[in-house]
Image: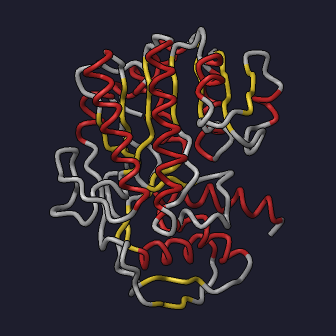
Amino acid sequence: MNQAMMQNSLNSGDFLQAQSVAVIGASGFIGSHLIDSLLEQGCHIKAISRNLPGLISPTALDNSFFSSHSVDISDYELLHELLCGVDIVIHLACSTVPKQSNLDPKLDVEVNLIGSLNILKACVARNIKRLIFISSGGTVYGTPESIPIDESHPTNPSCSYGITKLAIEKYISLYRDLYGLSGVILRLANPYGERQRLQSGQGVVPTFLYKAITRQTLEVWGDGSTVRDFLYISDVVEAIKSACDCDDSQFIFNIGSGQGTSINQLISVIQDITGLELCVDYKSSRLFDVPANVLSIDKAYKYLNWSPLVCSKDGIARFYKYLCDCYRV
């Protein structure tokens, strides 16, 4: 960690201590890791989710600064009640994944967009100091005109998931203008790491590692030249924490690794780490898959004082070791 990053981490810890933080969508992969880290820094956590405890760690569940609340984001009254006394809201809740969202766009809007409007309304009513929304750097831009993609790149999502994420972003911008809500948008790359659900249909890294461990054939859509931006979970958590106390003059940030990895390169890395010869079945490409997506993170470095610390090979090796322990390989 360089000196600037170390100082930012220390400042973030000082700021977060004793803050009351509501994590909405707390029971998922990112939320559970974030809660552990925030509790370590002395935050008081309200975990809000439909399905609890989900992936929330036993250590967090036993922490006296932690409380959990089974609430659907469609329930405005309960959200309003729970946000009383909260300083920071982190909005992770989402009930769809990109490849399924086009099957029922109406549901995507009814659950995710309308629910997010309830969160925004409750934040305004409770004078929340900071709202952080986890958007999707992998889908809001669509097919890129240039690589790496910076925050000024046109947004032309090709799936309902991305359209809904972008719509929520626009409402956050509107609420900033209308009500002075301090909303920060993090356009996240493809996160991976321990606790990630292996058969959820979201995330090529966990899917491939699971199939490698269980000796199944890897399915690749297209010829494997598709390029993606993969980010290890600890770097995701640090980016979110940095956004809790950033200057309010900038509020949209890409959060990624800063480099692209093709699917074929990913397979090669997994083979090197596991020592396994993987069987791969190449299938026809899908219409909603863009050929390349790599995010520019210059703005996050400049304004959040953040950059990723874990390279893909190290992150995947950590994840693989965790899975081997889980499956006793």
Q: If the image is split into quadrants, where does the N terminus sit? A: top left
Q: State the residue in front, 269 or 101.
A: 101
Q: State the residue in front, 317 or 79.
A: 79
Q: If the image is split into quadrants, where does the C terminus sit? A: bottom right
Query: Would residue 52 appear left or right of 39 to someone viewing this image?
Result: right
- Image height check: is 34 above or below 160? above
Q: Position of residue 178 (x, y in %)?
A: 28, 19
- Image height check: is 321 above or below 46? below
Q: State the residue in front, 70 or 274.
A: 70
- Image height check: is 107 above or below 78? below
Query: Would residue 184 appear left or right of 267 to someone viewing this image?
Result: left
Query: Would residue 326 appear left or right of 249 to someone viewing this image?
Result: right
At x 52%, y 24%, the residue is 89
At x 43%, y 75%, the residue is 263
At x 83%, y 65%, the residue is 328
Q: Position of residue 151 (x, y in %)?
A: 22, 44
Rendered image coloring scheme: secondary structure
At x 73%, y 21%, the residue is 66
